[in-house]
Amino acid sequence: MLRFSPGRRRGTAAVVLAAASLMLTLGGCGVDRVTPQAARGKAGTDDKAGTDDKAGAGERARRVDCGKVKCIALTFDAGPGKDTPRLLDVLKEKRVPATFFLLGRKHVDRYPKVVKRMADEGHEIANHTWSHRILTDLDEAEVREELALTQTAVEKITGRKPTLMRPPQGRTDDMVSEVSKELGLAQILWTVTAKDYSTTDSAVIRQRVLDQAQGDGIILLHDIYDGTVPAVPSIIDELKRRGFTFVTVPELLAPGKAEPGVVYGPEKD
């Protein structure tokens, strides 16, 4: 997800934000989804599932059983940005893993040391396209390029390609799913959004997350907006107080494994 923050390009912000509300409602329309519960159920209780050395950090080391404890995944879109190092400091201090859906152009290519730090500190690095084009508006070759460029850029820095992607605005269809499958990417939606592109008020962002948080949840935030990173410490503290365990997206699905092309997220209304 990527939006214009308050104070940036105000002339277009209102139009973008009006469209965003609709997109958040319609994300993933027409494509079947698999819930985290269903992914775990499909795998059964085989603890050997998801231990392939080529898999992500969360898949290699299943720290918790999300079928037995109340798990939630903290995810960040559209970075890295100038505030991401501070966010990584917070996550390290509070011992919380996160999943980062990274943009390639002007982000991965601008902050390679931050991307390397994410990987070194055990976070899951995922794909949010190269330039945030809406994939359902593109042809097959353009979708492939948007995803493949970021795959290559991340691999160059970390030594491995992402296995997860989040389509901008959650917009996907059968063609996007096929290209994702070809590139080895599962598609990850969300259950909680703070709409942090619409406010710089960290207290508002915090409350929106807390109001929606539930077990097997996937929180969508952005580490590129001014109000978001300051909200994270208190979000973590309160959710821990409520008994949540923070996990990466692969850990949320374990012992299941995110299958390329498949869309994972909440059940459709």
Image: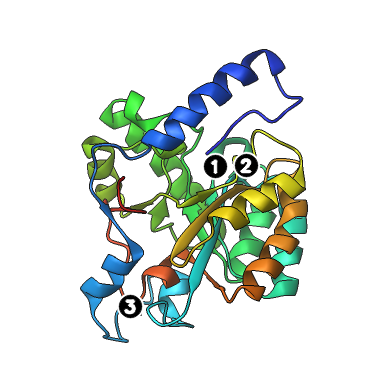
Q: What crowding class fits label 2: few (fewer than 14 Cα within 10 Å), some (14-19), or many (20 or more)?
A: some
Three-letter residue code for mark 2: His
Residue to which mark 3 is pinned: 255
The residue labelled by disc 2 is 107
In percent of width and height, residue 71 lies at 49, 72
Label 3 vs label 2: CA separation?
A: 32 Å
Residue 113's x, y, as percent? 68, 56
Query: In this orientation, does residue 68 appear?
Result: yes
Residue underneath mark 1:
103
**Disc 1 residue type (three-letter):** Leu
User: Residue 117: x and y, percent?
Assistant: 66, 63
Residue nearer the viewer, 151 or 61: 61
Q: Is residue 181 left or right of residue 61?
A: left
The amino acid beneath tag 3 is Pro
Instruction: Identify the secondary structure beneath mark 1.
Output: loop
Answer yes or no: do the residues labelled 2 and 1 have beta carbons within 8 Å?
A: yes
Residue 236 against residue 85 in the figure, above or below: below
